[in-house]
Image (spheres, rainbow, N blue to C red):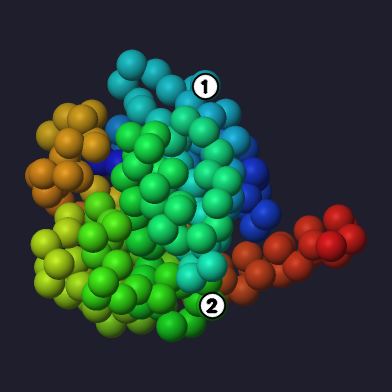
C-alpha cells in the first residue's frame, strides 16, 4: 500500500486542489491512500473523505500553525483550537491522533517547527522526507533526530498542485496506517519537487490575502 501523508486542498490558504480531483489524481498515480493536511483546518480532509472507497482511503489531518511552527495532526475528527505547541499536541492525542513534525529542519521555511531534544516526548513521528525540501540535508537531519529519539519516520509530498501528488510517502502492508507508523512497519519513498513551486505558492497566498483584505 502506498500513501502520501501530506497534501493540501483548496481549503488551505495556499492551496487550489479540489478534494474530488485529489482522489482521482492519487488513484491514477497508483496511490492506495492519502492524508489531507490543510493549514489550520480539517475541512479539506473531511470533504475529501467523502470520496473514499473500499480500496482507497483518506486520512483526515491538519497542519497547525503553533507559536513555534507547524505541527501536523493526523487521524483527526475535530478542529484544533489551540496554537500553543503543548496544547496542540494534547488536543491531537485527545482525539486519538498522531503528532507529526513536518520538515522540521528546513531553514528556508519560516513556518518550520523549531524542534528541540526535549520536544521528543510530545511527538509520535517525524517527517523525514518532504518533497518540497530544496536541500536533502534538511530531510537527513530530520532522520537523524528521529533515530536519536527512537521516533518513527514518515514521508509526504507536501503537494499544493496536481503534479506534486504522490511524489513522496510511505509503503506499508495494509490500510492499518496508524499501527504501521507507531510500530515503524513501513518504508519511505520520495522524489523532490522543483523550487519554482514555492514561489507559485507564495504568490497564490499573497493574492488570496489581498482579495480578502487581510
Identify which residue, 70 or 160, lies in the foreground: 70
Residue 214 left/right relative to 80? right
| Quarter of the image where one finds residue 93 | top left
Judge from the rendering whether residue 166 lies leftward or rightward of residue 110; answer left or right: left
For image coordinates 38% across by 37% down, the residue present is 94
Where disc 1 sits, the SS reads: loop
Residue at 17% across, 36% down: 179
> Which one is nearer the viewer's eye here, 31 or 181?
181
Of residues 169 and 152, the one nearer the viewer is 152
Q: Local crowd at mark 2 within 10 Å, few (<14), some, or many (≥20)?
A: few
Percent across and percent down for residue 181 are 19, 45
Q: CA gap, disc 2 to disc 1?
A: 33 Å
The residue sitting at the top extreme is 54
Q: Residues within 10 Å of mark 1 (few under 14, many from 20)?
A: few
Under tag 2, what secondary structure?
loop
Residue drawn 48% across the image and 70% down it: 68
Please name which of the two marks, 2 or 1, marks the residue nearer to the observer. 2
Q: Nearer the viewer, residue 97 or 155?
A: 97
Indicate the quadrant where residue 147 lies.
Answer: bottom left
- Give the quadrant of the C terminus: bottom right
How many marks are shown on the rendered structure? 2
Q: Which residue sits at x=17%, y=74%? A: 144
Instruction: Check disc 2 and report the residue beneath it.
Output: 110
Residue 184 location (% of width, % of height): 12, 49
Q: Which mark is residue 143?
A: none
- Note whether residue 142 is visible: no
Whether residue 181 appears in this view of the structure is yes
Give the residue number, with chain letter if any, for mark 1. 50
Quick one: label 2 or label 1, which is nearer the N terminus?
1
Provide residue 56's location: percent of width, then percent of height.
35, 26
Work out whether 4 lies above or below 137. above
Amino acid at each position: 500500500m502506498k500513501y502520501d501523508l501530506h497534501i493540501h486542498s483548496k481549503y488551505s490558504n495556499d492551496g487550489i486542489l479540489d478534494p474530488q480531483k485529489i482522489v482521482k489524481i492519487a488513484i491514477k498515480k497508483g496511490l492506495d491512500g492519502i492524508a489531507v493536511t490543510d493549514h489550520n483546518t480539517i475541512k479539506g480532509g473531511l470533504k475529501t473523505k467523502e470520496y473514499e472507497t473500499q480500496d482507497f482511503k483518506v486520512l483526515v489531518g491538519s497542519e497547525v500553525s503553533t507559536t513555534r511552527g507547524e505541527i501536523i495532526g493526523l487521524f483527526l475528527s475535530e478542529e484544533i483550537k489551540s496554537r500553543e505547541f503543548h496544547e496542540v499536541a494534547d488536543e491531537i492525542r485527545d482525539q486519538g491522533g498522531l503528532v507529526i513534525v513536518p520538515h522540521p529542519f528546513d531553514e528556508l521555511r519560516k513556518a518550520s517547527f523549531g524542534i528541540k531534544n526535549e520536544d521528543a516526548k510530545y511527538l509520535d513521528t517525524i517527517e523525514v522526507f518532504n518533497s518540497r525540501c530544496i536541500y536533502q540535508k534538511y530531510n537527513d537531519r530530520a532522520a537523524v533526530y528521529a533515530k536519536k529519539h527512537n521516533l518513527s519516520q514518515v514521508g509526504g509530498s507536501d503537494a499544493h498542485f496536481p503534479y506534486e501528488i504522490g511524489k513522496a510517502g510511505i509503503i506499508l502492508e495494509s490500510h492499518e496506517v496508524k499501527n504501521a507508523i507507531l510500530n515503524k512497519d513501513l518504508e519511505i519513498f520520495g522524489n523532490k519537487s522543483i523550487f519554482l513551486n514555492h514561489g507559485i505558492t507564495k504568490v497564490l497566498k499573497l493574492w488570496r490575502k489581498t482579495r480578502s483584505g487581510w
